[in-house]
Image (cartoon, rainbow, N blue to C red):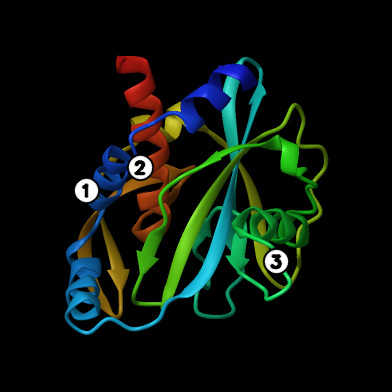
Amino acid sequence: MDRSVLSLIFRNFSRKKAEKCADEMLSDFQRMYFARYYAHPFPLRRSAVMILLFVRDDRLKTIMIERTDIGVHAGQISFPGGKAESSDADSIETAIRETMEEIGVRVRREDVIGDLPSVKVPVSKFEIFPVVAFVDEVGDFKKSESEVKKVLEVDVEDMRASLGNRVVTAAGKQYEVPSFLCGNSVVWGATAMVVAEMFGVMADAVSR
């Protein structure tokens, strides 16, 4: 897929279908927190992630990161991103800023080809707004040593093919969760919901 095709896909899709794909990735662990949230809603902090797409060796790729072993998201696999600052004009600016800060890749606003429905994460009190961009070349990475342990170049089709249920440990207990593989790492939870939205959008475009 080239930029023009991807731009068309991510600007013309069913948001309800994307949200349904995300909901299908919810684990029992997450549903427990969602039930509490909807029973007694509380404010969620705004954040944004960058789904950075590019083509290498005729394969569609994206970038994910493994976070350092510090903080509430220690060791997690995610897209580059973070919480919104008061100076950010919108979620696009948040995602662009965080991508530069975390992996040293400069994404221009004109590289953005769309966005996906937001994903609520009651357990961490955030609402994630995924931004989708396409670049011709990602260049060299310069990761934030305090936030990023590894920068991971991921084959999009390989990740899609890896969808399945796997056992993970959360809050000291084991849960079987719907997930994807990023290399040897299991991607589940909010990031898997965002990934599922992306694949749902792409599948919807192919089926039309």
- The percent coordinates of residue 93 (x first, y second) are 69, 57
Q: Is residue 178 above or below residue 53?
A: below
Mark 2, other Cα within 10 Å: few <14 / some 14–19 / many ≥20: many
Up/down of 93 relative to 40, above or below: above
Q: Earlier in the sequence, mark 2 or mark 3?
A: 3
Callouts 1 and 2 close, C-beta under 8 Å: yes
The residue under the point 22% across, 60% down is 27
Quadrant where the C terminus lies?
A: top left
The residue beneath circle 2 is: 196
Residue type at tag 2? Ala
User: Mark 3 falls on what kind of element?
Assistant: loop
Residue 68 seen in the current view:
yes
Where does the image place residue 134, in percent across and percent down from the top left?
65, 32
Q: Residues within 10 Å of mark 1 (few under 14, many from 20)?
A: few
Question: Which label sits in the foreground, 3 or 1?
Answer: 3
At x 35% / y 55%, what residue is drawn? 188
Which residue is rendered at x = 71% and y = 53% of the image? 96
Secondary structure beneath label 2: helix
The Cα–Cα distance between marks 1 and 2, rounded to whole angstroms, is: 8 Å
- CB contact under 8 Å: marks 2 and 3: no
Residue on which the image places disc 3: 88
Please report whichever mark, 1 or 2, sits nearer to the chain's N-terminal start: 1
Q: Which residue is mark 1?
A: 24
Q: Is residue 53 left or right of residue 103?
A: left
Q: Determine which of the numbered discs, if any, sits on residue 195 in the image.
A: none
The kind of secondary structure element at disc 1 is loop
Select label 2 or label 3 by which is in front.
3
When the figure is inspected, residue 197 is found, relative to residue 166, above or below; the finding is above
Going by the image, does 118 lie left or right of 146? left
